[in-house]
């Protein structure tokens, strides 16, 4: 169907690579021209070998799940005639260790706050259905094993992933 490309660039900037004393800061370049400064999370690799100001892969993973869910939700809402004026999500990813002791992002909780306009406003059942369909149709959610749940106003809608 389509291909998606990212260019990851890193270069050694000091003499102590073989001692493990090297910066892990790097960049991500995308086809539209955006360049994102990246680094491991300081909880994984302490400073000065990481940079907390840069995006880490775990944050980017959580953001990509949230972004995909939002874009799918907006498409479905428009198709059903609901006017969405704003959508804000403070998504949270949790890392745990798997059965082999390897850390992984085991759960992502989406916490969308949505403001609607227009004459047709969704009921809580409509909104829950939109989130369920968005989760089912999100490209990223269909590509991962992480459990994704959506917390809504007054209810939780667990994702379909284990």
Image (cartoon, grey):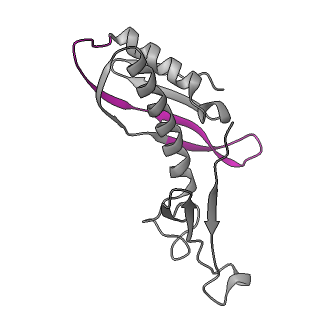
Which image quarter holds the N terminus? Answer: top right
Expressed as whole percent of the image width and height from the top left, the position of residue 24 reads 60, 72
**Above or below: residue 53 compared with residue 76:** below
Residue at the spot 66% in from the left edge and 90% down from the top edge: 15
Where does the C terminus fall, quadrant-wise?
top right
Q: Position of residue 145 (x, y in %)?
A: 67, 34
In this view of the protein, can residue 111 be seen by the observer?
Answer: yes
Q: Is residue 105 magenta?
A: yes
Residue 73 within the magenta-colored segment of the rendering = no
Q: In terms of depth relative to the viewer, which is nearer, 116 or 128?
A: 116
Residue 40 seen in the figure: no
| 26 vs 18: above or below | above
Residue 85 picture location, percent across and down: 27, 29
Prevailing SS of the magenta stretch:
strand
Quarter assignment of residue 6: bottom right
Please tell me in which quadrant of the rendered image residue 121 appears: top left
Numbered marks: total: 0
State left or right for residue 8 relative to residue 135: right
Q: Residue 122: which quarter of the image?
A: top left
In the rendered structure, which segment of residues is drawn in magenta? 93-122
Give percent across and percent down for residue 107.
Answer: 57, 36
Name the residue at the right extreme: 100
Image point (35%, 15%), residue name: 81
Closer to the camera in the image, 60 or 77: 77
Q: Residue at x 65, y 45 (%)?
A: 104
Q: Reply above or below: 10 against 160.
A: below
**In the depicted structure, whether residue 52 falls above or below residue 32:** below
Q: Residue at x 53, y 60 (%)?
A: 41
């Amino acid at each position: 169907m389509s291909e998606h490309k990212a260019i990851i660039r890193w270069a050694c900037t000091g003499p102590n690579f073989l001692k493990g004393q090297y910066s892990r800061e790097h960049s991500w370049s995308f086809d539209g021209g955006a360049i994102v400064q990246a680094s491991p999370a300081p909880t994984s690799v302490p400073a000065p070998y990481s940079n907390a100001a840069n995006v880490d892969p775990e944050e980017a993973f959580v953001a990509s799940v949230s972004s995909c869910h939002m874009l799918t939700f907006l498409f479905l809402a428009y198709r059903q005639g609901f006017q969405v004026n704003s959508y804000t999500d403070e998504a949270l990813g949790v890392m745990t260790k798997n059965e082999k002791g390897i850390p992984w992002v085991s759960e992502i909780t989406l916490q969308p706050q949505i403001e609607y306009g227009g004459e047709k406003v969704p009921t809580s059942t409509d909104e829950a259905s939109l989130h369920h369909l968005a989760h089912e149709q999100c490209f990223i959610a269909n590509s991962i094993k992480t459990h994704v749940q959506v917390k809504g106003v007054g209810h939780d809608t667990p994702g379909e992933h284990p």
